[in-house]
Image (cartoon, helix red, strand yellow):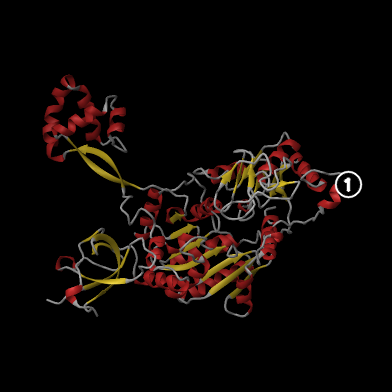
Amino acid sequence: MSEFYARIIVDVPVDNVDRIFDYIVPEAFKDRVEIGQIVKIPFGSRKIKGFIVGLSNQTSLEKSKLKEIMGIYKRESFFNEKQLHLFNWIADYYQANLINIIKMAVPTGITGGRVNKKLRIFFRINSKEEKKINRLLPEMIKKAPKQYEVLTLLLADEIDQPTASNIAEIADTSTSTVYTLEKKGFIERYYFEKNRRPFMEKNLDESIPFTPTAAQKEAIDSVCKDANRQKHAVFLLHGVTGSGKTEVYLQVIARVLEQGKGAIVLVPEISLTPVMVRRFYSRFGDKIAVLHSHLSLGERYDEWRRIKEGKAKIVVGARSAIFAPVHNPGVIIIDEEHENSYKQGSYPYYHAREVAIKKGQLYNIPVLLGSATPSVESFYSAQIGEFKYLALPERINKINLPPVEIVDMRDELKDGNISIFSRSLQQGIKKALTAGEQVLLFLNRRGYSSFVLCRECGHVIKCSNCDISLTYHAEIKRLRCHYCDFTRRIPRKCPECGSKYIKDFGIGTQRIEEEAKKMFPGASVERMDVDTTTTRGSHQRILKRVESGKTDILVGTQMIAKGHDYPNIAMVGVITADTILNLPDFRSSERTFQLLTQVAGRT
C-alpha cells in the first residue's frame, strides 16, 4: 500500500522556525485529511499543532526519519489552496512568517478550540413514552398538578423556546419539575444552535435602490461588466463627498448577488462599520456578516462560520475582513481607500488595499476603490492606466459643496480674542443652534492638552519608551503616551532644571468639549474619540444620539471626519487645522488635504 504524506507548517513560538515539515499520514486518516486542517504532530519531544499546507504521494526525505500525524483537531478546513496562495504571497511580499499570516487570517479562538458553537438546551415530549403519558395524565391532575401542566404545554407545542426556565415560568412552577420529568423519561432534551450576532438594529426599513445618475450608472455598468466576464481590474471611484458612492457599491453588489456570487466591503474605521452595516442590512438583510476587532470571540466565531458555510454572502468590516472565506467572491470594495488604517501597524505587517488587489487577481474579480480624496499612488495609477478611472464629479441633486472659510488665529489674538474658537466659528455655532441644527467640531488630537512644558528651560515631558511628548488627560489627571499607552503623573517640578513653572499647553478634544460646554451652556455636547469609545457598542450609542438630534455639538477626532451622513449638520469647525502639517511625516500635506476635505463634506 502506497504511503501518503502531509506537508505541515508548525505552530511554535520561535521566530526563525518558518519551515514546512513532511509527516506520514496514517492509513486511518487518508480519507479525512485536506489542506487547511489543524493536526496534532510530534515535534521533537513535544506534541504541537500544525496546519496542513500540502498533500502528496511523494517525499524527498528518507521515510525512516519521518513521523506520523497523531490526530486531527477538527475535521473542517480553515483555508483552501487559493487562500493559501494568498497567504504565501503576503508572507513573501511583506517578509513575514507564513504561520503568522495564517493565524492572523483565521480568527482567534477558532483554531485554539477556545470558542465553540453556542448550544441552547430545549425540552420536548419523549415520543416513545407519549402513549403512557396520555394514559397517566388524568391521574396526574390531582397527584402532580405542576407536572401535568408542563406535559400538557409540551404536548400542545405551545412554547416557542422550551428551555427549562421558560417552561417553568409559563407553567408557574420551578425548573426542578422539568428535570423530574426528564428523569422519569417523559421528556427529553435536544440542542438548538444559537448564533451570536454583533449588535444589529431591529426593524430597519427596507431600502429601495435609487435611480442612478448618469455618472453612477456608468460606474456601476463598468464594474459589473468585468464582474460578469470574471475579469480582474482595479477601478478607482473618485467621487466628491455626497456624490453617492455607497449607492454605487450597493447596486454593484446587488448585480453580483444575482450571479450567485459574494462580496467583501472594507471600511477604514470601526466607527464607520455600524453606519455602513445599517445601509447594507436595510438593502440585503441577513446576507450580511460583520467582521472587526471589537467583536467578542463568540461573535467573530459565529460570523466567520456563517461566511464559510455560505449563509452570509456579503462581508462588511475593517482591514482583517479581507481574509473572510467568502464563497465564490464576485467583487471586493474598499471604501475611503486612501485611509492609513488599512495598514496593519504591528507584525505581521500588510496593507489591506494591496492584499485586496492580489486577491482580486487570484479570483479574477474586479476591485473597486472609492474615495473623495484618493491616495497619491492610486490616483497616479489611474492616470497611467493601471487602474480604471471612474468619476462622480457632482453631489446628488447637484447640491453645492459647502463654502470654506480659513481664519488666521494670530489676527484673532491681536483683536483680543483669546478663545480656542474664532469669532466666525462662534457666530456660526450660535446661528446653527438657534435654528435647531447640529455642529461638528473636529480636532485630530485627543486628550485635554497636547504637552507639558517647563517655562523656565523649555523641557517637554516625553514618553520614556517612545520619546514622544505625553498628552495630558484631565479625567485621569495623568500624562499618557498615545503610542504605547505609558502613563505618569504631572511632575511638580521640572525634571531637567527643577523649576516649579511647569504647565500643560496646547489643546485636545477633551479641552474642546469643556470649552464648548462653557461657551454654549444650553447645548448638548458629546465627544467621540478613542477614549470615549472603548466600551462595547459605544460608537453606535454616540452616533445614534447624533442621528436622533439629542446631541447638538459633536466634538471628535478623525472618527467623525468621514462616512457619516446626517442632514441636520449645518456647521463644521476645524480647530488648529494646520496641526497635521507639522507632523514629521512625508504624507503630512496629503493627509491634511484629505482630512479637511472629508470633514468639510459632512455638511
Residue 8 lies, in percent from the top left, at: 29, 69
- x and y, in percent, of residue 517 in the image: 71, 37
Residue extending farthest to the top is 142
For the residue pair 231 and 521, the one nearer the viewer reads as 521
Q: Residue at 31%, 32% (x, y): give it.
A: 166
Compared across the picture, whether 521 is left or right of 93 comes to right
Q: Which residue is mark 1?
A: 415
Q: Quadrant of residue 401?
A: bottom right
Within the image, what quadrant is residue 184 found in?
Answer: top left
Answer left or right for 110 relative to 370: left
Left or right: residue 304 compared with residue 494: left
Three-letter amino acid code at disc 1? Answer: Asp
Q: Is residue 158 visible?
A: yes
Can residue 75 be seen in the rendering of this structure?
A: no
Q: Residues within 10 Å of mark 1 (few under 14, many from 20)?
A: few
Q: Is 375 or 172 nearer to us in this picture? A: 375
Pinpoint residue 508: horizontal percent, then vertical percent: 67, 47
Residue located at (51% from left, 43% from top): 535
- Helix, strand or loop for disc 1: loop
**Which residue is drawn at the image coordinates 44% and 68% (left, top)?**
96
Indicate the quadrant containing the N terminus: top left, top right, bottom left or bottom right: bottom left
Residue 6 vs 457, above or below: the answer is: below
Q: Position of residue 220 (x, y in %)?
A: 56, 69
